Image (cartoon, coloured by chain):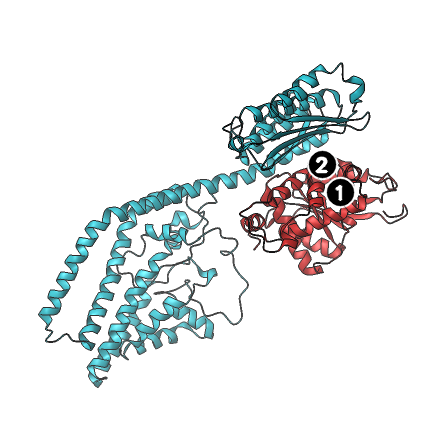
Chain colours: A red, B cyan
Amino acid sequence: MSEATAPPLRVFLVDDHAMFRTGVRAELAGQVPGGQGEDGAAAVGIEVVGEASTVADAIRQIVALTPDVVLLDVHLPEGGGRAVLEAVRAELGTGGPVRFLALSVSDAAEDVIGLIRAGARGYVTKSISATELAAAIRRVADGDAVFSPRLAGFVLDAFAARPDAPVADPELDQLTTREREVLRLLARGYAYKEIAKELYISIKTVETHVSNVLRKLQMSNRYELSRWAADRRLI
Amino acid sequence: MWLVRRTGCGWYAGPDAAGTPDRRSAIDTVVDDRRGGGWPGGSLGPRPPAEPARLQRRQDGRLAAGVAAGIAAHLAVPVVPVRVGFVVLLGFNGLGALLYAVFWAVLPVAPETRGAPRGRMVTLLPYAALAVGVLVFRGLAGGDQPATAALGWLFALIAVGAGIIWHQAGGGDQRRRAADPAAAGPPATPWLGAVLTETGRRAYLLRFVAGGVLIVVGTIGLAAVYAPVGGATVAAVVNGLLFALLALAGVGLVAAPVLWRIFGALREEREARIREQERAEFAAMVHDQVLHTLALIQRNVAAGSVAHRLARGQERTLRNWLYTSTGAPNERLAAALEQIAGEVEDAYGITVEVVVVGDAGTGEPVDALVAAAREALVNAARHAGVPTVSLYAEVEPELVSVFVRDRGVGFDPQAVDASRHGVRGSIIGRMERHGGRAEIVSAPGEGTEVRLSLPLTADRKDGSG
């Protein structure tokens, strides 16, 4: 984790509901720097550097501000969160400094999988508590992945071993036993710290497993994933 | 309301054999849909002008099919010389008509001009006069050998006939919007389309027959010119034609009811799809507005309060109605777990995060599992002292597992075992009676997890056990 003196994380909000933006901004402002991070180290502060309610405005401001993390609503008029994500990645490059965390009131699998496959580093529901949201933002800023229990469930479902499912690329199309265990615990409501304790591994190892799952989720061509992606016209 | 903003893939214009340019054609629209008319996705919107203009047909100001207008735009010349060129080429064995038909077949419609109204038909008159003039002049000048001339004209005839029939496949939509003032502004209502479907059928048939006649005449003419059957006379050709028509009529008589049914089925399918689209749009709108409001309420009131409980309950009801199609709670495990989670949420004002991977049918042992899970949820809601409880279930080929976990106060299982007969009987005992297992993991301050597992035998998986 970063030093307590590290500059605060710069966060940008994209949501077409003004009430929601206001609420998140106030909550994140309450997350003072120097508070306890999940692993006990002092956590960096979070500063909301801007917000947008439309796709075009969001793209313009994000490219100009290059925040560390963008909180991206899945459903936006004129193209949705995916349009923002793709435009910014086209502008700044796919390995650019800006990382995306998807937020949604929807639990629909195709929405979530669609945005993740377009490049978001994680997904949380909008009912998440302020503390958990702050933790998720820090995790995404560190380059790790954030899975809600529901997303972990989707992934387990999509990667379930089905005898009739052809496996084109075992490296990408299958989860390791360990990854499956980590996802199960995530779906059971365990925090990373608790998963580490349960499996006798370090938090860093848990993060690595989750990041690997995210990569598979983004790159695999498993039928279930392609179908979801096709439903959202990603291909 | 959004539903008719479809983009037609095809298009109609050109020699209108039925002479009813303003009547939309029913089957057009059906076929149009089936070819993936889909949503506009911006294709109706103006696009930045490409420079130079791509070679496309333009429907704005078209007289026949917009071919000449498109070529003129592509070459950046006025449209009149292009049209004159086509007319003059007519004199060369109908080359103009043949070329026109070929362009008509291969060029796409420029999207930004799609559905634009036709130019004034009066403008056609000078070109028609010019065409007659050219033909008369060619006739007087002697022209080519009669056989070659006939050949060109016959090919042109076939091409134009085929064009008329091919272009049936699209364009009903644009034509309706161009023709119907009410539909030109706001898109017409979906039921209106269904009504018009009935009246447009005759126009479709007329055009189909006209196109077919052109093709038949052209083909027979070609055969007569190039492969004269031994001793073929005009009478023989006419006789052959009559028999062919009789045979066609017979086939038509047999096929008509089938075709009628197919058209009916297509129409029903289309209406069902429209309803489905409407529902999806409605769901998206409701989802976005109402679910956001409910999520905001939950974020801003104390967990466990009446407002929180109501908002959560409303959200769950709405979400189930919008998305869930897992089956009836008395038939499928996933639906049963969602149901008990909802009951506990309502009764105790907590939030239950339900994640189910896979699904199984219900039956006696699975019902016991659900009941034990409910008991575990109730215990967590009453004793844990936290607003959120996780419920995770996974169905594997041989095993169903359910985990109920809270991050609450926890307890020492050894110390309180004796006083917790409720847990013993309703969770552990119940699971063991049905061949499953229950394990309670807890420690003071560390929360509680109830782990339930039930082996699935082959006959239980489908819910019959």
Q: Which residue is mark 2?
A: A128
Along the viewing direction, whichever of B238 and B393 lies nearer the viewer: B393
| Residue at the image point whose x is 45% and y is 47% from the top | B186
Amino acid type for the residue under numbered disc 2: Ile
Q: Position of residue B332 (x, y in %)?
A: 53, 30
Which chain is disc 1 placed on? A
Element on which disc 1 rests: helix
Along the viewing direction, whichever of B439 and B87 lies nearer the viewer: B439
Image quadrant in which you'd find residue B443: top right
- Mark 2 and mark 1, same subunit? yes
Along the viewing direction, whichever of B240 and A87 lies nearer the viewer: B240
Q: Would you call the spot at circle 1 few (<14 residues within 10 Å), some (14-19), or many (20 or more)?
A: many
Amino acid type for the residue under numbered disc 1: Ala
Which chain is disc 2 placed on? A
| Residue at the image point whose x is 73% and y is 58% from the top | A95
**A96 in relation to B70, above or below:** above
Image quadrant in which you'd find residue A198: top right
**B34 in relation to B397, above or below:** below
Mark 2 vs 1, N-terminal side: 2
Asked whether the beta carbons under mark 2 and mark 1 sit within 8 Å of each other, the answer is yes
Is residue A187 among the parts visible in the rendering?
yes
Marker count (numbered): 2
Q: Would you call the spot at circle 2 few (<14 residues within 10 Å), some (14-19), or many (20 or more)?
A: some
User: Residue A136: which disc?
Assistant: 1
Image quadrant in which you'd find residue B131: bottom left
Mark 2 and mark 1: Cα distance apart in space:
10 Å
| Residue at the image point whose x is 80% and y is 43% from the top | A203
